Amino acid sequence: MKKLFLSLAVVSAVALTSCGGKTETVEATEAQEGAATSEGAAAYTVDAATSTVNWKGGKTYEDINKPEDGHYGVVKLKEGTVSLMDGKLESGKFIADFTTFESKDLDADAESKGKLDGHLKSADFLDVEKFPTAEFEITSAKTIEGQDYNTEISGNLNFRGVPKNVTFKANVNVDGDVVSIKSEEFAINRQDFGIVFSAGKGSIIKDEVLLQIDLAAKTATAVAQ
């Protein structure tokens, strides 16, 4: 079981794709000033009950005959707001609650799931006791025409106390009192945020962690109903 536990050591905060996918790692640069909100912009409050960050992590082996391995799961959003001007995303900030971090592929094996989730929440990885939340603040949002996604979002990801600016694409849609933001699957490098744990014993934890944001937010009027 100890060997299994170590082999399950992968990290954080993604839609289901193969562990060997070709998702490129986004560049993590210095944090920037948050985007301003225009007078008259429509404000929406994040619906924490339905908003998540999906994650996926994996590992390879020194023995090239062994297939890649990995796990996936979710982190719930705690709170946040986004603002739109003329139906276009303009600014926003939301917070992920890492106390809710869990793997989902091991739901049928409670013992292994508990050990994996406990290790990933430890100081080796997420250090949830010290950093119970992570924050993302939009620094720019650009409309994209004629592509699979309609918006390019840049923002400061403050993860494990390390703020870095990252950019990804998303579809931003407004339906009545609700705005949805669903990002592409994108990858961050865990070492950019101070996660350097190495499993050893013939396995190599990937630096790339795949993320996918699935957010819903409602107008103040809708939230009050």
Image (tube, rainbow, N blue to C red):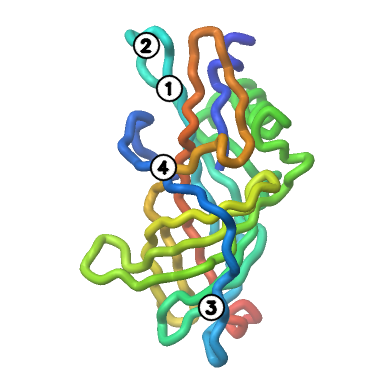
**Residue that sits furthest to the front in the current view:** 30
Disc number placed over residue 66 in the picture, else none: 2
Q: Mark 4 touching mark 3, by CB under 8 A?
A: no
Q: CA distance from mark 2 to mark 1?
A: 9 Å
**Residue that sits furthest to the bottom in the current view:** 40
Of tags 4 and 3, which is closer to the observer? 4
Q: Earlier in the sequence, mark 4 or mark 3?
A: 4
Disc number placed over residue 25 in the picture, else none: 4
Q: Judging from the image, what secondary structure is the residue with disc 3 in?
A: strand
Q: Amino acid at mark 3?
A: Ser
Which residue was labeled with disc 1? Answer: 69
Residue at coordinates 49% horizontally, 18% vertically from top-left? 204
Q: Amino acid at mark 1?
A: Asp
Q: Quadrant of the N terminus?
A: top right
* Above-or-below relation of 62 to 217: above
Which residue was labeled with disc 3? Answer: 83
Q: Amino acid at mark 4?
A: Thr
Q: CA distance from mark 1 to mark 4?
A: 19 Å
Judge the density around disc 3: few (<14), some (14-19), many (≥20) Cα neighbours within 10 Å.
many
Q: Is residue 195 left or right of residue 131?
A: left
Give x and y (percent) for residue 155: 52, 61
Q: Mark 2 touching mark 1, by CB under 8 A?
A: yes
Q: Quadrant of the C terminus?
A: bottom right
Q: Nearer the viewer, residue 175 or 189?
A: 189
Q: CA distance from mark 3 to mark 2?
A: 47 Å
Q: Amino acid at mark 2?
A: Lys
Of tags 1 and 4, which is closer to the observer? 4
Q: Nearer the viewer, residue 108 or 160?
A: 160
Disc number placed over residue 120 in the picture, else none: none
Judge the density around disc 2: few (<14), some (14-19), many (≥20) Cα neighbours within 10 Å.
few
